[in-house]
Amino acid sequence: MSTFVLPSLNQRIINKEIESNNYNYDLISKHLMPIEFGNKIKEYRIKNNLTQLDLALKLNLQVNIINDYENGIGIKNKIIIAKFNEIFNL
């Protein structure tokens, strides 16, 4: 039995842009957090022996949001960035 997983909001936005044949990396990338930010999140999480689920629960976020940010497809969001900064003391 396979499980059905909804794509994250970020993936849906990017997919919609691609499907509409208006794919423009510069347009999409300006809304995404830099991969360096995602690398810092992953580094902190691993250093503190946290899974993505652990971190998501700690920040009251969905796991797919943690995953998106770590993979460089997290959409810029002041509230989410503030949560990361608070826990990581960035």
Image (cartoon, helix red, strand yellow):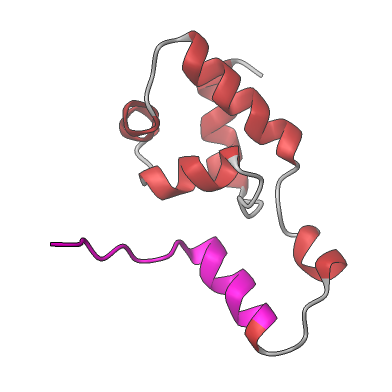
Q: Residue 70 location in percent, x, y?
A: 58, 37
Image quadrant of residue 10?
Answer: bottom right
Q: Residue 11 location in percent, x, y?
A: 54, 65
Extreme residue toward the front, this view: 1
Q: Residue 9 location in percent, x, y?
A: 49, 65
Frontmost residue, 82 versus 68? 68
Frontmost residue, 88 versus 79? 88
Q: Residue 89 location in percent, x, y?
A: 60, 15
Q: Is residue 63 left or right of residue 65?
A: left
Relative vertical location of residue 58 with respect to residue 21 in this rendering, above or below? above
Q: Is residue 7 magenta?
A: yes
Residue displayed at 59% across by 19% down: 43
Extreme residue toward the bottom, this view: 20
Q: Is residue 65 left or right of residue 58?
A: right
Image quadrant of residue 39?
Answer: top right
Relative vertical location of residue 81 with respect to residue 22 in this rendering, above or below? above
Q: Is residue 56 left or right of residue 25?
A: left
Residue displayed at 58% across by 43% down: 69
Extreme residue toward the right, this view: 26
Residue displayed at 60% across by 43% down: 71
Q: Which residues are magenta?
A: 1-18
Quarter that holds the N terminus: bottom left
Q: Is residue 45 magenta?
A: no
Residue displayed at 56% across by 26% down: 42
Quarter that holds the C terminus: top right
Tag count: 0
Image quadrant of residue 30?
Answer: bottom right
